[in-house]
Amino acid sequence: MAWSLAFPFSVAVLGAVLQEAPPDPPTPIEQALMEHVCSVVPPGGAPESDRYLACLRTQLLTLRTDFGRDLSRLSAAERRTLDSACNEVRTVSGREAYLDCLGAQLNALRSRRNRGKPAAPPQVVPVPSSESAPSVNPAPPASQGSSGFSGLLIGAVVVAVALAVGGALFLLKTRRVSHKCRVCGSEVPAAGDLCQTCRHEAAETVRRATAERAEQQRALEQEERRQKEHEAQEAEERRRKAQDEEEARLLQQQRQHEEEARKRADEERRQQEEEARQRRTAADVPDDEFDPYAVLELPRSASKDDIRSAYDEARAKCDPALVSHLGYEVREHFEAKLQAVERAFQMLTE
């Protein structure tokens, strides 16, 4: 009789335990969060594998209980909060840091939701007073035989329930969802589409891709820096070349000015030497060849008054005081010309 009473209850307990398993496999985001949390549990052989699978199932049930399948119970504002908090972490630090951030945000959201739930009001059980409480006649004492049978029945029920629960747990542990790895095709004992080896290889591939992208970015930055340095060097060379050309042009102009000044000085010196030579020649001309009328610029029929006027005018023009501030050759020229004027005047007035 005890087994007949305990069997339906045991079946009900077994069904409740089996219903704890999720009806469908986890989504990618659920799989990632489960494996990240359970990564501390060794995924190897028994009993570690049982602990690892139990951890995965527990995490999946917790996620779906709090946030629904594939986090479908999250509102749009909560999803935006998660994305703004963790997307930059994924870009900078990679997948593991992103999962750490996402798990921390979900835990914080779970805590806020639990704090926001109103507490159940205490139930007040009215205590009847002695005046209004009806008198209850005490039950007649049961016989000793019936009490022993009831204890035996209760003990049998407890044993049956314990056996049923133990069998259900054993079936749940031994139950394996067989999956095929989508890369190598091997059996995957846990929920997911990748075996442990392929999952590690995928993580390594992601890490290498991230390192390659970082290396490419560094190479691009170095190339841009070299290009800027090359452009700066070219600009500096153009500036230096323009400065050298300007200095060369100024030097050429200075040399031209100096050459022109030297030529003018040589020409003036030649003229002065020629004039001095002519003056010396005029002063040394003998009397029979000296023409006083030509010196005073007079016709041969000029009177004494004309001679005197021409003499005064020529003497005024040849006054040495007029050229006292000039060079020696100029002063010498004027003196020689004055001597010629004096000689012409003497010859015409004697």
Image (cartoon, grey):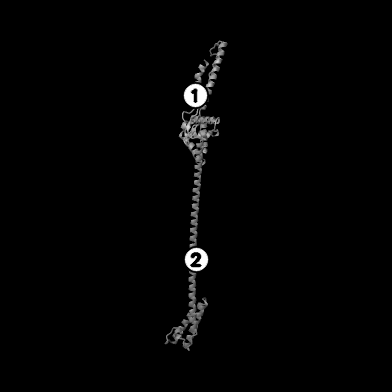
Q: Is residue 145 left or right of residue 27?
A: right
* Cα distance between the residues tagged 2 and 1: 105 Å
The residue shown at (49%, 25%) is: 18
Mark 2: amino acid: Leu
Front one among 332 and 205: 205
Mark 1: amino acid: Ala
Residue 122 visible, this angle: no
Q: Position of residue 156 (x, y in %)?
A: 54, 17
In this rendering, the answer to whether 127 lies above or below 229 is above
Front one among 58 and 318: 58
In this rendering, the answer to whether 13 lies above or below 79 is above
Earlier-in-chain disc, 2 versus 1? 1
Q: Which mark is residue 240?
A: none
The residue shown at (48%, 66%) is: 252
Residue 222 visible, this angle: yes
The residue shown at (50%, 52%) is: 226
* Helix, strand or loop status at disc 2: helix
Report the residue that reaches farthest toward the bottom.
350
Q: Position of residue 315 (x, y in %)?
A: 48, 82
Badge 1 density bin: few <14, some 14–19, many ≥20, Cα 10 Å: few
Tally of marks: 2
In this rendering, the answer to whether 81 lies above or below 134 is below
Front one among 348 and 273: 273
Front one among 11 and 167: 167
Which residue is under mark 1? 16
Q: Position of residue 88 (x, y in %)?
A: 50, 40
Badge 2 density bin: few <14, some 14–19, many ≥20, Cα 10 Å: few
Q: Which mark is residue 251?
A: 2
The residue shown at (49%, 21%) is: 11
* Helix, strand or loop status at disc 1: helix
Give the foreground label among 2 and 1: 1
Q: Position of residue 66 (x, y in %)?
A: 49, 30
